[in-house]
Image (cartoon, rainbow, N blue to C red):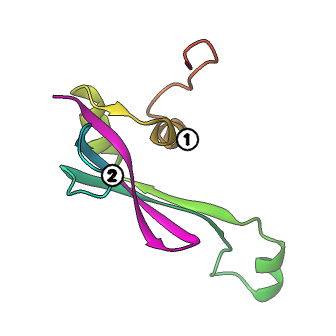
Amino acid sequence: MVVRIRLSRFGNKHQPFYNIVVAQARSARDSKPLEVIGTYNPLPQRPTNLSEEEARRAKPFKEVSLDRSRAKYWLGVGAQPSEGVWRLLNLAGLVQPKSNAQKE
């Protein structure tokens, strides 16, 4: 029984939004997961709590929210992250970056 940490897509056409989920490897992308451990919005957002002038100069960011303790738990029991989730977990400092030799 292989468990994967992967992205499950939500949102409208041209406006993707992803849940970071733990699911069986053989289940469909949007089927019911074992657990939802975070969200990822790949569309760059501008900060909203700044003045109009500061908001124009501020760099847009992609929003990622992750329950770090649950992600550590699932990695500890052997869940395998997908390629996209691996990058997000690397940004959070939970896994080491993959080198070119490891990619196949």
The residue under the point 26% across, 37% down is 25
The residue under the point 30% across, 36% down is 4
Q: Residue flagged by tag 2: what amino acid is it?
A: Arg
Q: Is residue 103 above or below residue 82?
A: above
Pinpoint residue 73: horizontal percent, then vertical percent. 24, 35
What range is drawn magenta here?
1-20
Is 34 left, or right, of 52 in this rendering? left
Residue ID for mark 2 = 29
Is 100 left, or right, of 94 in this rendering? right
Q: Residue flagged by tag 1: what amino acid is it?
A: Leu
Quadrant placement of the N terminus: top left
Front position among marks 1 and 2:
2
Residue ID for mark 1 = 91
Pinpoint residue 20: horizontal percent, then vertical percent. 37, 52
Is 94 left, or right, of 1 in this rendering? right
Neighbor class of circle 1 (other Cα within 10 Å; few <14, some 14-19, many 20+) is few
Q: Is residue 25 above or below residue 31?
A: above
Work out whether mark 1 precedes mark 2 in sequence or the reverse, and give the earlier one. Answer: 2
- In the picture, residue 70 is in which quadrant? top left
Let me know if residue 58 is in the magenta part: no
